């Protein structure tokens, strides 16, 4: 039994302890920063812990025991594609021949690293049916912003300066409108039909010469494939706009169909979703952005290119949308994603989408008597329930999520998409076995039964977690965000 | 395929539950012309042994160089404990801590990270992390515009790292924000001109660097007053490692501190993953982008941590959010937290002392070769610019041939050289010898 651990690292600190060993300072006698002018130096020492190395190892190991990851158990967090994160990826990205490279290393001394970048970009272009990719953006939302910068640059370079609006479906991820706003665009929302797809009739009147483009994800956030996408692409292009593909849901169609073939001009991919790089408790991810033929020059700088002799070099294009990162993105994440693609190979990449979709449909069909399925039919990699079928006991989606924690599962995404009041968004991913899904299905049914037979049990869950439901109101009303504020109480 | 658990029998049974006959039926609604029926132009699957060989071979085409380059990325020591902890699956394979009851590990280390960053910068509050130092500075720019409301101009000192400046300029361009450059004089921000540029009462923020791009520790005495008198916010992009010794952004009077925390134990990794930090005053906390973790209690009164002030964020506010940031660099914040736990303020001071010592020793020795002079007569920490009497390119190439990454060329006759505690006297002497022999 692991004992309950609730210390902060600061609470282990004791004057005189140390957790580091540094090389001998060979210049100590001659040079000291203590000789810097007094007005350039700080007056007090920062309050940092003084602990031993062992203290640090034990502290963070104990903290990790209070955390739940994909390695711990089933993590059906919709839209986040919490698939298995292979360990070989971790080994490869930690190779010293790559980790010790300074970004200012001349290209003749970093050919191996540049080749990883170049080949990964080419692989993503092949998989998505587009012409070229940048791997510089650091995350999905950063990719969206980069893609929208490309969209604006495209119109601006054609002298088409009126296009300041971007169309976003009402079911879109929150980052879509937020990215558009950061890019200086106005958001126009397009409605969904009763079956959850973009309402083409609602879209048509929105398409005028002030529209820069549309942002879509396909399948959408309900896990439904937008079958009218060829018509939507035709309409948007006819109106002079571009189509942006939010790659958050790419796992659904990986190997089955390609955004480029659907008519999209620009897209991002979340390497931490579709390409198995670990989510790291909230990042780092990476958000490569791809473009169709004719838009390559707009990709952000710096760009990695190959000359006729097969040598890689770093270039910048004056017409580029600009610079969005320090250098070439989260390089370690790129190493992991490339490893994953090589491990799968062309024969297995094709199976990712079908198996992910199979898992989602299996769970959906197995639970639709207990949970309200607002939209019938075959889903793609994920689907959404609108809470329980029987809502008479007042058990909410939040209660269900919390009860799942007691049974050893991470909760699905809840209260998103916003189309339903009690959304429960489930994405099982292709790396989960039938046995895992069967156990999850059984637990979901148990929770549904508890909600009827003993609703208070569900409403007060969880019970077995390291902490129970939190007082979030007080946390926001008088925020304490540092140790100093906490002890000042 | 080792990542797919499905047996043929599983697939049949699962399809039956879904009322389907084949995997293709799962995609039946997709218009035929959209289906991809070809082979991908990708290599065949590789075994783990082949993967290792493949990347070892690629790695052999990178050169292991003794690093004297900086310019925002420094070759500091990264303790072995960090990687051991980072690799724990409970941290590595979790996502954003939306379910705090089973995410106290992530939430608590972010709280510790926030505590440490505010200690180093002297600021009141920081967020859970930004992508890197360049985007953190761009977000700081956006904060100044949001706080000022009716102003859309920011000033950026010419002495800031140009890689930071160009990202700020890119973000600004699309938001219709005007970026003007405050000129430099003798390697530091021209403060008289800065004051004149503020006279129009139209500037939202002023972005400065410490130490600046040339490694110089600038004297910003009185600058906060100049900015605040004109209702402009002062933003300081500071190297957090140096803040164990140097006056903090808060002490200089900055409203926002930002930068890259790569110097706090993160390997150079060919440019990423790093972590940007962004810290500010209590007055501006509601303008801060990204995740913030706060302390609270659970229903049993136990201390616990939770994402807080979420009404600033994209998943709640959509287009009205402070920023579009969602995924950040949480795991890299854990790097920094473990690093600072191990080092404490004394270790970090020793890092600074050794780096300072090596840099000043090297600077003197280089000047003695007659091939270089110090570009500026100003105080510096561990990085400095030299003017070269021979083309800087020649020096770099000679050093490269000797296995040394000899700084960053910032002009045809100027090199920016950085020394960390990892550089030995022997390595420094070798560099000097190569330069001497040119």
Image (cartoon, coloured by chain):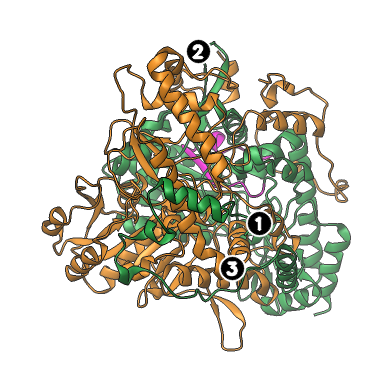
Residue beneath disc 3? A345
Mark pair 3, 1: CA separation: 14 Å
In the rendered structure, which disc, 3 or 1, sits on the residue that comes first in sequence? 1
Quadrant in the rendering for residue B227? top left
Secondary-structure class at tag 1:
helix
Query: Which chain is depicted green?
Result: B
Chain on which label 1 sits: A
Front in this rendered view, residue B311 or B225: B311
The C terminus of chain A - image quarter: top right
Chain on which label 2 sits: B
Residue B80 shows in the view: yes
Q: Mark 3 vs mark 1: tell me if same chain.
A: yes
Per the rendered image, the range of residues in magenta is B245-263
Residue beneath disc 2? B299
Residue beneath disc 1? A89
Secondary-structure class at tag 3:
helix
Left/right of residue A453 with respect to residue B151 in the rendered view: right
Near mark 2 (Cα within 10 A), the count class, few <14, some 14-19 or many ≥20, is few
Across and down, in percent, residue A194 comes to 20, 45
């Amino acid at each position: 039994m692991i004992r309950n651990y609730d210390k902060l690292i600061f609470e282990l600190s004791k004057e005189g302890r140390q957790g580091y060993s540094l090389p001998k300072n060979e210049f100590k006698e001659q040079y000291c920063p203590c000789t810097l002018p007094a007005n350039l130096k700080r007056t007090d020492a920062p309050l940092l812990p003084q602990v031993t190395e062992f203290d640090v190892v034990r502290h963070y190991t104990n903290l990790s025991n209070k955390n739940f990851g994909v390695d711990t158990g089933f993590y059906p967090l919709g839209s986040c594609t919490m698939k298995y994160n292979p360990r070989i990826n971790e080994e490869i990205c930690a190779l010293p021949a790559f980790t010790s490279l300074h970004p200012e290393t001349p290209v003749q001394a970093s050919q191996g690293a540049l080749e990883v970048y170049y080949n990964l970009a080419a692989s993503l272009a092949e998989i998505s049916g587009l012409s070229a990719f940048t791997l510089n953006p650091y995350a999905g939302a950063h990719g969206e912003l980069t893609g929208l910068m490309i969209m604006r640059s495209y119109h601006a370079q054609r002298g088409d300066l009126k296009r300041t609006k971007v169309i976003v479906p009402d079911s879109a991820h929150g980052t879509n409108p937020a990215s558009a706003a950061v890019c200086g665009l106005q958001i126009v929302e397009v409605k969904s039909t009763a079956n959850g797809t973009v309402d083409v009739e609602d879209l048509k009147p929105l398409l005028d010469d002030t529209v820069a483009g549309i942002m879509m994800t396909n399948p959408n956030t309900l896990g439904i494939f937008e079958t009218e996408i060829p018509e939507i692409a035709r309409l948007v292009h006819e109106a002079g706009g571009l189509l942006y593909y939010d790659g958050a849901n790419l796992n659904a169609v990986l190997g089955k169909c390609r955004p480029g073939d659907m008519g999209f001009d620009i897209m991002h991919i979340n390497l931490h979703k579709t390409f198995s790089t670990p989510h790291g408790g909230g990042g780092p991810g990476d958000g490569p952005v791809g473009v169709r033929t004719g838009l390559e020059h707009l990709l952000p700088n710096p760009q990695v290119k190959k000359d006729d002799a097969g040598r890689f070099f770093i270039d910048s294009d004056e017409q580029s949308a600009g610079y969005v990162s320090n250098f070439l993105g989260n390089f370690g994440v790129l190493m992991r994603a490339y490893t994953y693609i090589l491990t799968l190979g062309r024969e297995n990449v094709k199976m990712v989408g079908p198996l992910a979709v199979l898992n989602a449909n299996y769970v959906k069909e197995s639970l639709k008597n207990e949970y309200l399925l607002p939209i019938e039919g075959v889903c793609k990699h994920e689907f959404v329930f609108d809470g329980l079928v029987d809502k008479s006991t007042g058990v909410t989606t939040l209660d269900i999520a919390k009860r799942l924690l007691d049974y050893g599962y991470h909760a699905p995404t809840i209260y998103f998409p916003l189309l339903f009041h009690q959304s429960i968004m489930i994405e099982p991913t292709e790396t989960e076995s039938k046995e895992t899904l069967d156990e999850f299905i059984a637990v979901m049914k148990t929770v549904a039964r508890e909600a009827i037979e003993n609703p208070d049990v569900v409403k007060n869950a969880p019970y077995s977690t390291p902490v129970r439901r939190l007082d979030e109101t007080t946390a926001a009303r008088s925020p304490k965000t540092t140790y100093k504020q906490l002890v000042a109480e | 395929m080792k990542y797919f658990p499905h047996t043929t029998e599983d697939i049949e049974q699962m399809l039956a539950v879904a009322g389907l006959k084949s995997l293709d039926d799962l995609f039946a609604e997709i218009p035929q012309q959209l289906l991809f029926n070809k082979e991908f132009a990708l290599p065949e699957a590789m075994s783990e042994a082949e993967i290792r060989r493949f990347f070892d071979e690629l790695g052999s085409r990178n050169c292991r160089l003794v690093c004297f380059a900086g310019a925002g990325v420094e070759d500091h020591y990264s303790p072995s404990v960090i990687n051991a902890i980072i690799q724990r699956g409970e941290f590595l394979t979790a996502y954003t801590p939306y379910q705090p009851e089973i995410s106290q590990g992530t939430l608590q280390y972010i709280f510790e990270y926030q505590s440490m960053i505010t200690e180093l910068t002297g600021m009141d509050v920081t967020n859970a992390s930004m992508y890197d130092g360049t985007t953190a500075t761009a977000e700081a720019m956006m904060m100044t515009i949001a706080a000022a409301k009716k102003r859309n101009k920011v000033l950026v000192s010419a002495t800031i790292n140009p890689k930071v400046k160009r990202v700020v300029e890119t973000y600004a361009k699309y938001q219709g924000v005007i970026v003007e450059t405050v000129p430099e004089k003798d390697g530091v921000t021209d403060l008289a001109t800065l004051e004149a540029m503020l006279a129009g009462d139209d500037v939202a923020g002023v972005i400065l660097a410490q130490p600046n791009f040339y490694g110089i520790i600038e004297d910003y005495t009185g600058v906060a007053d100049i900015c605040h008198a004109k209702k402009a916010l002062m933003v300081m992009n500071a190297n957090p490692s140096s803040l164990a010794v140097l006056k903090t952004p808060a002490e200089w009077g900055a409203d926002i501190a930002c930068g890259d925390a790569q110097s706090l134990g993160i390997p150079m990794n060919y440019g990423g993953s790093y972590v940007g930090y962004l810290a500010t005053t209590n007055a501006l906390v509601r303008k801060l982008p990204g995740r913030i973790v706060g302390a609270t209690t659970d229903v049993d009164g136990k201390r616990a941590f939770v994402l807080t002030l979420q009404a600033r964020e994209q998943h709640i506010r959509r287009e009205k959010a402070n920023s579009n940031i969602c995924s950040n660099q949480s795991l890299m914040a854990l790097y920094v937290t473990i690093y600072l736990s191990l080092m404490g303020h004394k270790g970090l001071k020793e890092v600074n002392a050794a780096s300072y010592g090596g840099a000043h020793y090297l600077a003197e020795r280089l000047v003695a070769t007659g091939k270089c002079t110090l570009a500026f007569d100003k105080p510096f920490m561990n990085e400095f610019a030299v003017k070269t009497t021979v083309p800087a390119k020649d020096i770099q190439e000679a050093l490269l041939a000797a296995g040394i990454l000899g700084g960053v060329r910032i002009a045809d006759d100027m090199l920016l050289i950085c020394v960390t505690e990892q550089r030995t006297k022997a390595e420094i002497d070798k560099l000097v010898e190569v330069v001497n022999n040119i």
